[in-house]
Image: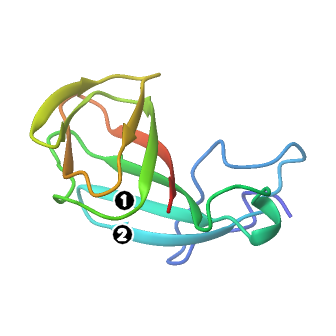
């Protein structure tokens, strides 16, 4: 089965780049949110994908914000590692603001307050891992 054959819940195609070497999707996809300004989902990594000593809970996410849109204000127990894939944005992390650009990696500590805005002319696309 190819990635084109496997659609997310709600008939939304899987985002590019989340396939293994033979082109088939191996992770279970769950659509988290979809609105006119943002969409995103997650891949829950099965227990066999978690190596010894790895976190008890590990999830992979992708999110896309349209220009001018923002995420909701957020705070949670999980630690997140974000990779900025494309677009430009601004992150407010524990009251401090920083600009986001493609290729950057951001760590969101557990219980840190955060919100992100798309400040560029194209969607801000992020891929992330969260663990607790």
Q: How far across and how far down the image is residue 107, in percent?
A: 40, 38
Contact between labelled residues 2 and 1, with CB atoms less than 8 Å apart: yes
Q: In what element is the residue under mark 1?
A: strand
Q: Is residue 50 above or below residue 68?
A: below
Q: Residue at x 62, y 67 (%)?
A: 56
In depth, the one of 6 and 131 nearer the eye is 131
Q: On the image, which quarter does residue 87 sit in?
A: top left
Seen from the viewer's position, the closer of residues 20 and 46 is 46
> Residue beneath label 2, please?
33
| Mark 2, secondary structure of its residue | strand
Left or right of 9, for residue 68: left
Whether residue 87 is situated above or below residue 126 in the rendered picture: above
Q: Residue furthest bottom?
A: 10
Quick check: 36 above or below 15?
Answer: below
Tell whether 7 sits left or right of 72.
Answer: right
Tell whether 99 sits left or right of 43. left
Seen as rendered, the residue at the extreme right is 22
Residue 70 pos. (x, y %):
17, 49
**Residue 52 position in % (x across, y down):** 79, 57
Residue 81, given in percent of the width and then of the height, sits at 47, 42
**Which picture quadrant has residue 24?**
bottom right
Q: Which residue is mark 1?
A: 39
Return the disc, 1 or 2, that comes first in the chain's sequence: 2
**Which label number is shown at residue 21?**
none
Identify the residue at horizontal 36%, vertical 69% (top origin). Answer: 33
């Amino acid at each position: 089965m190819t990635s084109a054959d496997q659609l997310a819940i709600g008939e939304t195609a899987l985002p590019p780049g989340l396939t293994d070497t033979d082109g088939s999707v191996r992770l279970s996809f769950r659509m988290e949110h979809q609105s006119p300004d943002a969409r995103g989902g997650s891949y829950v990594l099965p227990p066999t994908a978690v190596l010894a000593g790895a976190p008890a809970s590990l999830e992979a996410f992708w999110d896309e914000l349209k220009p001018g849109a923002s995420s909701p204000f957020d705070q949670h127990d999980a630690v997140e590692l974000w990779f900025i894939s494309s677009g430009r944005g601004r992150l407010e992390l524990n009251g401090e603001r920083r600009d986001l650009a493609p290729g950057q990696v951001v760590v969101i500590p557990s219980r840190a307050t955060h919100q992100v805005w798309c400040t560029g002319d194209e969607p801000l696309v992020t891929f992330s891992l969260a663990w607790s």
